[in-house]
Amino acid sequence: MVPTPIRVRGICQDIPKKSDMSQVRVGRWGKNLALRVPKEIALATGLEDGEAVQIVAHDGDIIIRRVAAHTRAREAAAAAAEIVVESRRHSLGGTSIRDLLEEGRRK
């Protein structure tokens, strides 16, 4: 089932329908409260034991973000920007990418 995207203060978040959500019980861990992440959620998100996450309160809800996933996304965006800058330094000798693709298909 595809989550329904909704906009919250300019941030697009994919909120699953109620039937896709897991329900967990809050427990105590020392002086703090703790949540257990169900295995299917961990597998679906790639969350691993010991991984750092960010947790914030937003309008009475709890939002958990994977730090590693956001770091990888930022690194990928930086790498893409670097590729674009580097590609502008090199010429294809007047040949377009489309021409090169067509030539490759003919071979």
Image: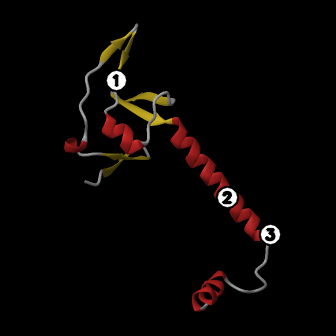
Left or right placement of residue 84 versus residue 18 in this view: right
- What residue is pinned by disc 1? 35
**Label whose residue precedes the other's in the sequence (1 or 2):** 1
Residue under the image location 67 percent in, 58 percent down: 81
SS class, disc 2:
helix
Residue 8 visible:
no
Three-letter residue code for mark 1: Leu
Q: CA distance from mark 1 to mark 2?
A: 38 Å
> Residue 3: image x %, image y %?
30, 51
Q: Residues within 10 Å of mark 1 (few under 14, many from 20)?
A: few
Left or right placement of residue 90 versus residue 21 in this view: right
Q: Nearer the viewer, mark 3 or mark 1?
A: 1
- Image colouring: secondary structure
- What residue is pinned by disc 3? 89
Q: Which mark is residue 81?
A: 2
Q: CA distance from mark 2 to mark 3?
A: 13 Å
Three-letter residue code for mark 3: Arg
Three-letter residue code for mark 2: Ala
> Residue 87: image x %, image y %?
73, 69
SS class, disc 1:
loop
Residue under the image location 44 percent in, 42 percent down: 46
Q: Nearer the viewer, residue 58 or 71?
A: 71
